[in-house]
Amino acid sequence: MTNDGTKYQVEGTSPHMTGERLLEETRKATMFGEHLWVMAGTWKVDPAKMQAGAQALMDHESLLGLAGPGCYVCEEPYSARLAHRRCKGDPRRPR
Ligand SMILES: [Zn+2]
């Protein structure tokens, strides 16, 4: 659960967990040369809460760190200057 009360299913077909949404957002951003600003978070997870049907807690107490924001496509850190420029990254070419 996030601080705003959003719950994430540990197992299942949630687009958040399968990466389908990330692929779709990457496709849309690269189609128009836009940056895809993202942040990554790391939470300490209790294995006892990861059994099927259980909800993983993603609360403030379990949060270990955040990284970003940065562009998922060009892998550059966010800056107001870069945000106004066209994204030159290519998700098909890892850096
Ligand atoms: Zn970019």
Image: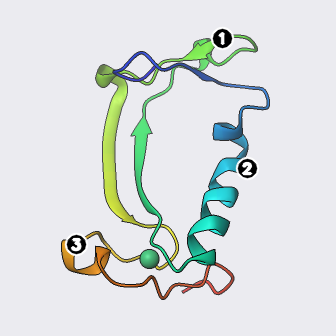
Front of the two marks 1 and 3: 3
Marker count (numbered): 3
Give the residue pinned by disc 2: 20
Q: CA distance from mark 3 to mark 2?
A: 27 Å
The amino acid at mark 3 is Ser
Q: Is residue 62 left or right of residue 31?
A: left
Instruction: Tell whether 68 sits left or right of 95.
Output: left
Q: Which residue is mark 1?
A: 54
| Horizontal and vertical percent position of residue 79 | 22, 72
Callout 2: few (<14), some (14-19), or many (20+) C-alpha neighbours within 10 Å?
few
Q: What distance separates the C-alpha of mark 1 from that of mark 3? A: 38 Å
- Classify mark 2 as within 8 Å of ligand 1 or not, answering yes or no: no
Report x, y in % for residue 90. Answer: 59, 84
- Which quarter of the picture shows residue 3? top left
Q: Amino acid at mark 1?
A: Ala
Element carrying mark 2: helix
Relative to 67, residue 41 above or below: above
